[in-house]
Image (spheres, grey):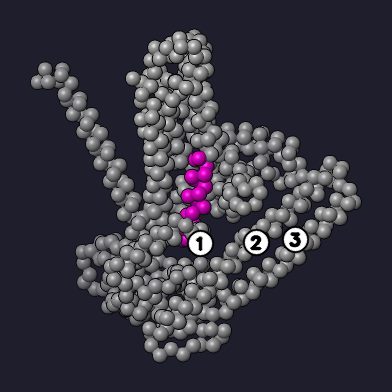
Amino acid sequence: MGKWFKSGSPWIWMTSGAVSISLIAVIGLLLLIASRGLSYFWPATIYQWNMVDDNGKPYQLIGEIYDQEAVPVERLLQAGVPLPAGTKGMVTRYLVKTGNRELVGLDFRWILATNIRSRIEPKDIAIIERSKNGFFYGFPVAVVENGQRLPTTDKQQLAQQLAANISRVSTLVDEAKSLQKHDIGNINYQLEQLRLDERADKLNGSLTSAKQHAYLAQTEALQQSYKILEQALFELRAQASRDSIVMLDMSGKEVSLKLNTVLDLTYPNQLNWLQKLAQWGSGLAKFVVDDPREANTEGGVFPAIFGTVFMVMLMAVIVMPFGVVAAIYLHEYASKGPITKIIRIAVINLAGVPSIVYGVFGLGFFVYMVGGSIDNLFYPEALPTPTFGSPGVLWSALTLAILTLPVVIVSTEEGLSRIPSSIRQGSLALGATKAETLWRIVLPMASPAIMTGLILAVARAAGEVAPLMLVGVVKLAPTLPVDLNFPFVHLERKFMHLGFHIYDVGFQSPNVEAARPLVYATSFLLVTVIVALNLTAIGIRNHLREKYRALES
């Protein structure tokens, strides 16, 4: 036994076991997040319950089961819940999503199995996804066009009428959104730029009468174009709000819903397995490409995906040159003395600084000092409204670049130290300068290690939230950092981030039950984005390793 311990085999087995357990735990966690998040988009069965309340009064309930649990009878009795006489043991209760938020006020409710008299799955019950007030559950009754209720002979004809009208209204709504976002937004941007240019000339004392008349003429022309587009927008909205759908809700009352708020209508109880799979894929695609709605508890997360990827790429462009140059100086040029050792220790210690401290530093130095100075020098006409003197994507990228700089420096130095000195000496003996040796020999051979530093930096930066809350991230950004207005890339704008989106939906949402599956879905999406970025960097690293392998032989 003693020889076995001295051989080191137990430690090898212990290490491999710990790695295996860690790997299983990580995979299990990812599977849990994926199952909880992706199952949210699967079309659920809609039930209609015949219920009785605590006083024995009958009523109907329509909805989908979100969760269920067994509750001890004693706990219910202690909570003052009346139960039928003779109830013992455990009672099942269901968490039901009822929708129809503007009518019943409760998006979710718990119901006890003891209050259920019967449960059916009506085939003609429909789910309406809306742009506001969440889902609506009920039975389609009729379509109203221009104030006239259309006659229907059967349910199939009604479904065809609904599909045609929803398609027409969706086209009008999309046209209105595009007109407002692009054409009208572009005119508003030009009007603001004209105002700033005129104020800049006034501050500089160069605002002549001719310039003032020119600004006035351009402003009037833009305002005329704005009025034309505004009239077209009002017409599109009027056409979109013309039609409505009549639904029969759970209480048996007819409710009229405007079609311009309807995003989709489905009959989930009529779908087979393949149709549900297609519906699941459609819901997942909408989650990826749509904008958020209802305080981020519904809709998609595209702005958060775009903001995360854009900020990480900007951070990588900033941190790589500085990290590589610093590592080259410390390893190739700096003397091996106490000062260099102190610098290396300081670099390593920077990796242990809490991320929120970097956020405070970024807010004080980048936003207030650097951004405020830029505003005073280059954008005085916009003051007191800040341009770069407020949190934005540029300051977020710079803050995270400083946060991940030690990782890149250490990784690059490790790569440089693995290159034999004989290669450097051979290059110098052949007449190459030290700079040429570094550029043509050393850096290509160290490029896999540099890419390893980038991989670690991307993984760290993509998951950071605390510093971003101070230097640029917001709950809901009105516009993306990239658009069609010059200069096309607006680094001063605030942005959305998947990590902050998870925090906001999970801990700041007023509708906890609705937000819970979105937290899992967004978490899985964040992991997917990080893995995709890392796989891209790993692919580049492997390509560089193969490309410059000949230099090592």
Q: Which residue is drawn at 18% across and 29% down?
A: 13
Q: Earlier in the sequence, mark 2 or mark 1?
A: 2
Q: Which numbered mark, 1 or 3, is in the foreground of this view?
A: 3
Label 3: few (<14), some (14–19) or many (≥20) C-alpha neighbours in 10 Å: some
Q: Earlier in the sequence, mark 1 or mark 3?
A: 3
In which image quadrant can residue 217 be found? Answer: bottom right
Magenta extent? 296-313
Q: Which residue is drawn at 58% across and 48% down?
A: 481
Label 1 sits on a secondary structure element that is: loop
Percent from the top left, x then y, of residue 103?
48, 74
The amino acid beneath tag 1 is Glu
The amino acid beneath tag 3 is Leu
Does 30 sit left or right of 468 as displayed? left
| Residue under numbered circle 2 | 183
Label 2 sits on a secondary structure element that is: helix
Percent from the top left, x then y, of residue 208?
89, 48
| Residue under numbered circle 3 | 222
| Residue under numbered circle 1 | 294
